[in-house]
Amino acid sequence: MDYRFQWVHCVSAEHPYSLALRVTVARTLAIAGVVLALAWGWVQHVLSLTVPWWLDTPAVFGFYGLLYYGLDSWAWRVPRIAAVLRVPDLRGTWRGTIRSSRNSFEDEHAVIVVITQSWSTIRIVLEGPWSISHSVAAHVTDGLGTESFEIAYQYANMPRAGAPTAMHAHVGTAHLRLSSDAQLLEGDYYSGRDRQHFGHIAIRREKT
């Protein structure tokens, strides 16, 4: 089954997510900004350069901003940098199935998950036959055993207009493990008070 993401761009925006090294990296960028600003001042002195006040005064913040932008937009995905930062690249379209305790795990439902991500923000949108959910908070940690990373996130779910009457809008949590080849996400989800169901998710990344 091929569900279309009619609501992807209106249900949510990308939100921050937590990483183990985020504070350390931010401090490192700040120190690098100071060092680059001092180097820039030395270059001006040695070459007797005269620069406009608006270019010289915000040098530290300017260098920090450039470094942060470069890291956030593309550098974090470079394999060697990603290995140091301990951040997985989850971007892309994932397809798989969900089984729910609602029907004793007897039925298997096809789902599509679209993940957009930068170093600082993420968005996880899951669409099934009767509802669509989007993440509102997330946390990424190192995995155990054959899993390279684990991601835990909280989501908000909204049923479609034609969904069964027993389905209601609700919040829940999901805990997924990323395989060592970074192509499979698998784990469990738990719905909130209104639903009180739990289930299993297994999705595989589409090749691009």
Image: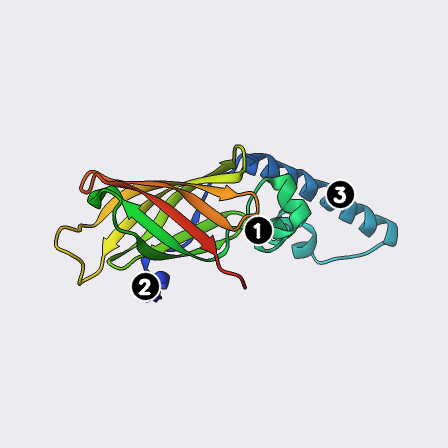
Query: Looking at this view, is 160 or 32 the one in front?
Result: 160
Residue 175 in the image: state x and y as whole percent: 39, 39
Amino acid, disc 3: Leu
| Outermost top residue | 144
Residue 145 in the image: state x and y as whole percent: 54, 33
The mark that comes first in sequence, 1 or 3, is 3
Label 2: few (<14), some (14–19) or many (≥20) C-alpha neighbours in 10 Å: few
Q: Residue at x 33, y 49 (%)?
A: 98
How far apart marks 3 and 2 lie (CA) works out to 48 Å
Residue 152 in the image: state x and y as whole percent: 41, 39
Residue 11 in the image: state x and y as whole percent: 32, 58
Amino acid, disc 1: Asp
Q: Quadrant location of the C terminus?
A: bottom right
The mark that comes first in sequence, 1 or 2, is 2
Q: Is residue 8 left or right of residue 45?
A: left
Label 1: few (<14), some (14–19) or many (≥20) C-alpha neighbours in 10 Å: some
Query: Would you place residue 72 above or below residue 206 in this image?
Result: above
Front of the two marks 1 and 2:
2
Residue assigned mark 3: 38
How far apart marks 1 and 3 lie (CA) works out to 24 Å
Q: Is residue 117 left or right of residue 60?
A: left
Residue assigned mark 1: 72
Q: Residue at x 65, y 38 (%)?
A: 28
Label 3: few (<14), some (14–19) or many (≥20) C-alpha neighbours in 10 Å: some
In the picture, the disc for residue 7 is: 2
Amino acid, disc 2: Trp
How far apart marks 1 and 2 lie (CA) works out to 26 Å
